[in-house]
Amino acid sequence: MCPPRSEPPSALAGEPPAVPAARPRGRPRKAPDARDDGNRRQLIIDSAARLFRTQGFDATSTRDIAAAADMRSGSPFYHFESKNALLHAVVEDGLQRAVASQQQALQQLPAAAPPRERLAALVRHHFEVLFGPEGDFIPVMLYEWRSLTPPQRASIDRVKADYEAQWMPVLQALHDTGALRAEPALARLFIMGALNWAVQWYRPDGRLSLDALTGQALRLFVGDR
C-alpha cells in the first residue's frame, strides 16, 4: 500500500505558490565548467597574449582581441569579466602549462642523471617555452606586472614558485659539488633573469640553435666541468 502523498510545507500552510525569479536580460555568462567549449577560451587567451606582447596591455582593446580571435567584439566578456582578468589568465595559464611541461622534462631524465644534465634540461626547457608558440606570457608577465592587481599577483606568485622550486634541488646539488659558486637562491634569480632577457636578442633563425644556446648558457653558469 502506498503512503499518502504529502504536500510541501508552503502548500499545507495555504501560502501562494512561489513565483519564479525573473531571468536576467541578455546572454547569460557561461559557467566556469562550460567556458572552454570549442577551445574558444584558449583562443582568446592566445590572441590576447600575442597582442599584449606586441602592442602592450594598455594599447590593446578587447575589440582588438576579439578581432584577432575572429570573434564578435563582445565575445571575450562571455569568458572573462574584464580585460584585466584576461591579462591574469594569460600569465597564470601560461605558467601552469610551463610547470607541467617542465616536470615532464625532468621526469624523462634517468633517475641517476647528474646535476649538470638536469640543469641542461631545465635551461633547454625554459628556452623552449620562451621561444615556443605559447611563450608570449613570459614577456607579458615581465612587462605588464604592474597592471595586475595585488590578489592576481599573489596567485601568479604561487604558480611561479612551483616552477622555480624545481630548479632549487639541482642548483643546490651543483653548489655542493663546487660547480656553482653563487648561493643557489641568488643563482636562480640571476639565471632566470639572464634566460628571460634572451627574448630581446636571440633569433631562432640565427646562427645558434636552442641546443647551442643551452650549451653556452651552461658554460656561463657552471663552467665546463
Image: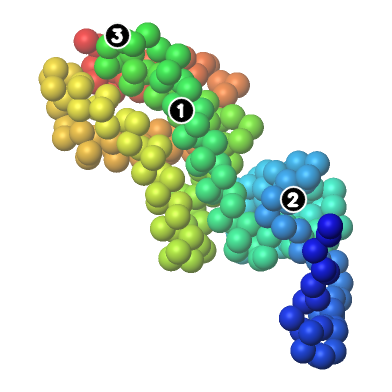
Q: Marks 1 and 2, how far apart in space?
A: 28 Å
Would you place residue 77 above or below residue 181 in this image?
Answer: below
Q: CA distance from mark 3 to mark 2?
A: 43 Å
Q: Nearer the viewer, mark 3 or mark 2?
A: 2
The answer to whether 6 appears left or right of 143 in the picture is: right
Tell me the kind of residue under disc 1: Gln
> Mark on residue 102?
1
Image quarter hosting the C terminus: top left
The amino acid marked with disc number 2 is Ala
In this rendering, the answer to whether 5 lies above or below 203 is: below
Where's residue 167, x and y in %?
32, 30
Q: Which residue is mark 3?
A: 112
Residue 33, x across and y down, in percent: 69, 50
Q: Which residue is mark 2?
A: 34
User: Can the viewer see residue 30?
Assistant: yes
Badge 2 marks a residue whose secondary structure is helix
* Three-letter residue code for mark 3: Ala
Name the residue located 60 percent from the left edge and 61 percent from the top edge: 85
Q: Residue furthest front?
A: 1
Residue 64 in sight from this viewpoint: no
Identity of the residue drawn at 82% across and 90% down: 14
Residue mark closest to the camera, 3 vs 1? 3
Percent coordinates x, y for residue 95 in the rendering: 50, 41
Contact between marks 3 and 2 (CB within 8 A): the answer is no
